Amino acid sequence: MFEKRSDAGYQQVLPGIRQKTLVHGDKTLMVEFLLEKGAQLPLHSHPHEQTGYLVSGRIRLSIGEKKQEVLPGDSWCIAGGAQHNAEILEDSVAIEVFSPVREEYLP
């Protein structure tokens, strides 16, 4: 599967947080998140493993009891079921891969 870059298809999921599924297969799904300074991703968990890469900006990511300021080029992996949240410190772009596929993120 190939997907060409497009500005279309972003969905507002929370105030200041937009997402777009870029591509997916049978076992993984890749999403781009556009995050506005001051936005908050509340504490939550899901059964999907989540691996991410910060393209630009700055966020504070908490996974369980661990907190980390994440800068461009940094990456992370969140185990399925782990509690996590994020505070968006600067306008940011993040790419994340979920496994298994998050059905609610399918286009």
Image (spheres, rainbow, N blue to C red):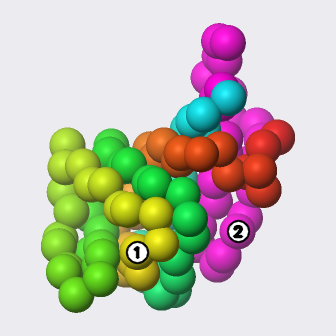
Residue mark closest to the camera, 1 vs 2: 1
Q: Quadrant of residue 83?
A: bottom left
- Amino acid carrying mark 1 in the image: Ala
Asked whether disc 1 touches disc 2, contact meaning CB atoms under 8 Å apart, the reply is no
Q: Residues within 10 Å of mark 1 (few under 14, many from 20)?
A: some
Q: Which residues are magenta?
A: 1-25
Q: Which mark is residue 82?
A: 1
Q: Residues within 10 Å of mark 2 (few under 14, many from 20)?
A: few
Q: Position of residue 8 (x, y in %)?
A: 76, 37
- Amino acid carrying mark 2 in the image: Val
Task: Label 2: state its secondary structure.
Answer: strand
Q: Which mark is residue 69?
A: none
Q: Position of residue 65 (x, y in %)?
A: 22, 87
Q: Is residue 66 above or below residue 47?
A: below
Q: Which mark is residue 13?
A: 2
Q: Residue at x 19, y 80 (%)?
A: 67
Q: Earlier in the sequence, mark 1 or mark 2?
A: 2
Locate residue 16 relative to residue 92 in the image: left or right: right
Task: Label 1: state its secondary structure.
Answer: loop
Q: Could one spot residue 54 in this view of the protein?
A: no
- Give me the C-alpha separation between circle 1 and circle 2: 20 Å
Q: Is residue 3 magenta?
A: yes
Q: Toward the viewer: 42 or 45?
A: 45
Locate residue 59 relative to residue 40 in the image: left or right: left
Q: Position of residue 50 (x, y in %)?
A: 44, 54
